[in-house]
Image (spheres, rainbow, N blue to C red):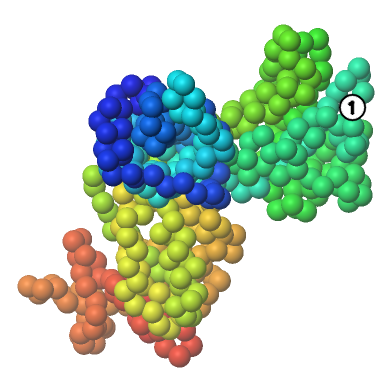
Amino acid sequence: MRRLLHQFISRIIFTFAVCGLFSVAALANNPAFMSPKLLTKAAGNDMESARKTAFIKAELAALQQVLPRFVPETGLDRVPVPTIEQLESMVEGLEVHDQRMNEDGYVGLVSIQFNEEAVAKFLLSRQVPFTTEKSGPVLVLPIFIKDGQRYLWEADNLWREIWLTEPNKQSLLEYVIPLGDGHDQEALPIHSATIDNEEGVKALKDRYGAKSLLIVEAEAVENAVSLSVYRSGPIGGSRQFDRSIEGEGKDLNRLLLDAAKFVGKRYNDSWVSARQVTGTDQIQEVPILALAESLTEWNIYGERLKAIPLVRSVELLSLGQGLAKTRVEVAGSVQQLQAALSQSGLELFPMTYTYVIQRSGVGDPRYRNDAISYMDEPLPVRVETYDNGQAVDANGEPLQDWQLDQNGNAYNPTPTTNTNGQFNTQGIY
């Protein structure tokens, strides 16, 4: 990626200057794909041509800035230099905060917004590992320690004030700072604000809908901040790490800001490493059934599927009897698809010859819904093999719409239901 600032600049600058391919707009999209404000310069006597040259430099620099947010460190060297067309497709907008023309040329302060879908397609096509999945809420309790005094809910907690400025708002993790009202203070008072206070920690997590909680202690010491981080997750709590954030000449507020960014980057990097997907030239079709009574209800599933970068296409094949039969093309594994859906509040439940998509946390769909309660039950059929394969019932009568798989097993790719919502043929075998 370091080559981005040095290769093909002259070729790109010329093309953009001729075509005028720039979008200047107020930007308000996914913050993970927004660059910080960048100072960009370009020599030239004509402001318009110099400005366009500076914009190209800023776009290339901005891409280098945002990629580490969703590409693991081990994958950054695999990101190729984009072509002119690829760069154009990935830039969604450019905002100019300040600009001027002086004797040396154009100088501007700009922010670049990249298009999430376009960046994901670019990385998938080059088989670069990445993820754009956002986490659920992660609750952060900033405890500030100074001169032996601990602060959590108090108004003079400088460490909490730093976190309230959202120093990690461009992370894939959604950090939430508790309100600090009476309910919070009663659930976890400062004297018992530890990861071992399971009851208090659970009360806060439940209130804010968070599965994970971080207790981040920052102690002010000479020319440094000493960090200790503890985490309570779905299966218990543990001490995560200790770190000293040093900075001679920096004031306490700047040290605390550096410490907050360090925590955010560490957890974002861990998230990206755990959730990364890699594109593949091999596209597989995944059959999926959804419990949907209407097209509107199905669209909830369909839109969330389409938002996943490794999903290439979503096709609704049929809708009726409370079930939507769907074919999804995936550039990756089913396990990767399941992991991505879990971040959208959905789960993909494996059945024989198909999968069922549903809201997370509602349990095994076979025992929850009569329409699919027999999906994995054996069928009372015997299989007669003809040239084209045929399934028959116990009386030798053909069963319509049934097929034989490559192993000679009978299955129904489109099960039918009766008025009670149960499969007439006992589902898929």
Q: Which residue is mark 1?
A: 150
Q: Secondary structure at mark 1?
A: strand
Q: Residue at x 71, y 26 (%)?
A: 257
Report the quarter where the N terminus lies.
Answer: top left
Using a 10 Å C-alpha cutoff, classify the residue at mark 1 as few (fewer than 14 neighbours), some (14 to 19) or many (20 or more): some
Picture coordinates of residue 417 (x, y %)? 40, 84
Query: Which quarter of the figure has residue 245?
Result: top right
Left or right of 59 on screen, residue 184: right
Left or right of 385 on screen, residue 156: right
Picture coordinates of residue 137 (x, y %)? 66, 47
Q: Nearer the viewer, residue 270 or 94?
A: 94
Q: Residue at x 63, y 44 (%)?
A: 174
Q: Nearer the viewer, residue 61 or 371?
A: 61
Query: Which quarter of the figure has residue 314?
Result: bottom left
Q: Nearer the viewer, residue 295 or 53?
A: 53
Picture coordinates of residue 261 (x, y %)? 64, 28
Q: In the image, is residue 308 above or below residue 265? A: below
Q: Amino acid at mark 1?
A: Arg
Left or right of 155 on screen, residue 420: left
Q: In the image, is residue 303 above or below residue 16? A: below
Q: Residue at x 88, y 48 (%)?
A: 181
Q: Nearer the viewer, residue 34 or 13?
A: 13
Q: Is residue 56 visible?
A: no
Report the quarter where the C terminus lies.
Answer: bottom left
